[in-house]
Image: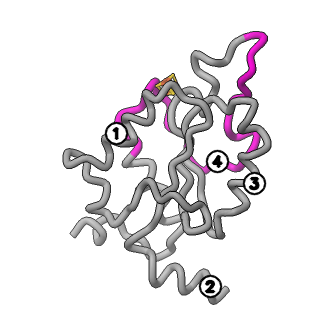
Amino acid sequence: MITDKLKNFVRRKSFHVTYVDTGSCNGCSIEVLATICPRYDIEQYGIFVHHPNPREADVLLITGCVTEQWKTKLKELYDKVPEPKVVVAIGACACSGGIFDQEGKRTHPPLKNFIPVAAEIPGCPPRPSEILDAILGVAPIVFKDYDKKEANK
Ligand code: SF4
């Protein structure tokens, strides 16, 4: 499709990530924030995290154990992101429930039960370097011409 080709040409070196918290303890959120800070500096790859509008996102970065309120909203949110798109699940909560996967719970992990997930990063919380690696790993799925080495020049 022409829109896919255009997107690939224009945004392959500046793609947008929307961060969504579906009920985390904020431990994972701090690690996501650390990827933006100077030590990991995710923007050197042309990646903009915390883009607030899912209609302009390429990657959904999702933490948390999927609370009651998020059960129906997740699919709606996913549908708003234009194709091609990928979802990355961050942390044990999103991948399997972690400490919130308990009996009589009002949480509904894992995330992949609600929307397709391209990559899962376990850990409580995962390290910023692992989050960075996962985002760089899914970039070629969204942008056929994405070259990690070239982006790092
Ligand atoms: S995986 Fe651990 S750090 Fe991340 S939201 Fe769950 S409990 Fe918090």
Residue 125 included in the magenta stretch of the image? yes
Amino acid type at image mark 4: Val
**Hey, which quadrant is residue 128 in on the image?**
top left
Residue on which the image places disc 4? 117
Amino acid type at image mark 1: Pro
Residue on which the image places disc 1? 128
What is the crowding at mark 2: few (fewer than 14 residues within 10 Å), some, or many (at least 20)?
few
| Residue drawn 41% across the image and 43% down it | 131
Amino acid type at image mark 2: Thr
For the residues marked 3 and 1, what is the alpha-carbon distance in whole angstroms? 28 Å
Percent of width and height locating residue 84: 62, 69
Label 3 vs label 4, nearer the camera: 3
Residue on which the image places disc 3? 76
SS for dot 1: helix
For the residues marked 3 and 4, what is the alpha-carbon distance in whole angstroms? 15 Å
| Residue drawn 37% across the image and 70% down it | 147
For the residues marked 4 and 2, what is the alpha-carbon distance in whole angstroms? 23 Å
SS for dot 4: loop
For the residues marked 1 and 4, what is the alpha-carbon distance in whole angstroms? 19 Å
Q: Earlier in the sequence, mark 2 or mark 3?
A: 2
